[in-house]
Amino acid sequence: MKNRLLKVTINGTGFAADYSAQTYGMIPHKNGVEIELAGVTSGRIANAETFAEKHGVSQAFESHSDMLQSVRPDIDNIACANFAHGPYAIEAARSGVPVIVLEKPPVIWPGYREGREADAETRKNESMDYLSDVLDAVRENGSKLLYAEDFIYFDGVKALVELLIESRKANKGKVLYQFGVCAHQGSHAPAYDTPALSGGGALFNKSCHPLGPCLFLKQVEGILRDGKPIRPAKVSAVALQVLKHQPESSGEHFRVMQNVDDFGRLTVVFEDQTIAEALGHDLSITGIRNELSVITDFAKYDIRVNPNNENELFLPAAEPAGNLLFREKLPTPLGTSFPRPNQFHSHGYVNEMNDAVDCALNPDRYPQSGPMMAWDTMAILMAGYESSEKHGQFVDVSELVSRREFTANEMPDPNQFGRVLQRT
């Protein structure tokens, strides 16, 4: 029997593009399926050509539209600078791409690229109007959108979904309080400190990570119990520039942002009056921190993805480690560290891309993190900046969240999320 060939294209040549390319070679084995990295594009063709040679991509292209027309991919990964997310998603949908993998955040405020200024409330409303246009294009052209929030695809989150399903038998399954963190020393991507390219700083690009599973687990809880997701109702937030206002010596081990926030904190109140808090910042001197803690009516579940003390290493000198990276953003291997082997697995990237491949192979399967997740995330992030501008007061998002209706295949299906726990 001839193998089924899936053609994958990648937009961008930075960190997200790099792990996307590597991850497709790590997904769980599927008989009769061959995955070809068929195309890559970048803002500079030289970067695309270098990336193609490094990762074995069939061809480098000067533009996204040329790549789509030439390759006709089954999966298009939008892993480029944030300002291009919206236009590329629309372009992919209109080109008939079956599965579009859209990295976070979904879009940025269109006014940035137009050279406009506006208050946070205006930016929020215009951003949601723009995202609605993007999701309309996806829906009208029959594409499937996977909103690539890797925290949702942690094995620990998968285990929590299994627990929520099982707990229903004991009349339990209420998620009461969630707290998550994403932090490191500050992105070195050139676009990060430019709002017109990144859309924002730590609140927009880091707190979005723990926010994702918090929204997801409440969606799953509601679907399991009542057949409809539990959505966010209001948000309070702060977005601050910490290092910019400190002595120059304080920024020695960090990238000091001049134009975007390096600290963001979100408090989300859901329509059932439960709480989630998401923290994102660029002040972690010890490298990446990816953590999530969930308190339910039957258990407390702590997910310590990175650092994690499953492995411990002590090096009295750094030189023997060469260029080995023991965990993401670790500034030095010297001393005691907690290596994270197979980071792409533990960080959810493999599960994420595996979902995309399953959706490309099965016409009846849809992404677990889809359009509703992108919508609710964007609503919270933009309302978060509005709240920060109003000194942390709560901003009601219930009307904004309910403005758009979603079909069942644009929401999670807990019974299709996959199993990671064994049974007795």
Image (cartoon, rainbow, N blue to C red):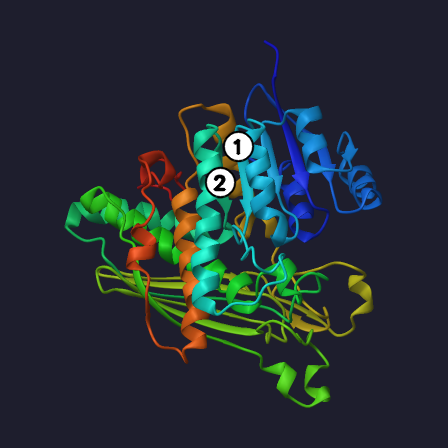
Closest to the observer, 73 or 113: 113
Looking at the image, residue 198 lies above or below residue 107: below
Q: Secondary structure at mark 1?
A: strand
Asked if labels 2 and 1 touch by Cβ distance under 8 angstroms, the answer is yes
Q: Residue 28: horizontal and vertical position, in percent?
A: 54, 34
Residue at x-position 66% and y-position 63%: 192
Q: Quadrant of residue 70?
A: top right
Reading the image, the residue beneath label 2 is: 146
Residue 162 pos. (x, y %) = 32, 45
On the rendered image, what quadrant is the N terminus found in? top right
**Which x, y percent locates residue 150?**
51, 50
Q: Residue at x 49, y 42 (%)?
A: 134
Three-letter residue code for mark 1: Val
In this image, 292 relative to 326: left or right? left
Residue in the image at 62% along x and 60% along y = 198
Instruction: Tell me the distance, in whole angstroms, between the alpha carbons under discs 1 and 2.
Output: 7 Å
Name the spot of residue 397 as percent of width and height, x first.
33, 61
Give the number of marks: 2
Q: Is residue 199 above or below residue 248?
A: above
Q: Which mark is residue 107?
A: none
Q: Is residue 155 visible?
A: no
Between 87 and 26, the residue placed more toward the observer is 87
Q: Amino acid at mark 2?
A: Leu
Is 98 situated left or right of 365 in this image?
A: right
Question: In the shown orientation, is residue 144 left or right of residue 329?
Answer: left
Please state, as top left, top right, bottom left or bottom right, where the C terminus lies in the image.
top left
> Which of the marked residues, 1 or 2, is nearer the chain's N terminus?
1
List the residue tagged with mark 1.
99
Is residue 401 visible in this depiction of the protein?
A: yes
Q: Out of 392 and 415, give the one closest to the viewer.
A: 392
For label 1, the crowd category at 10 Å Cα-Cα, with few meaning under 14, some 14 to 19 and many 20 or more, is many
Residue 373 sits above or below residue 393 on the image: above
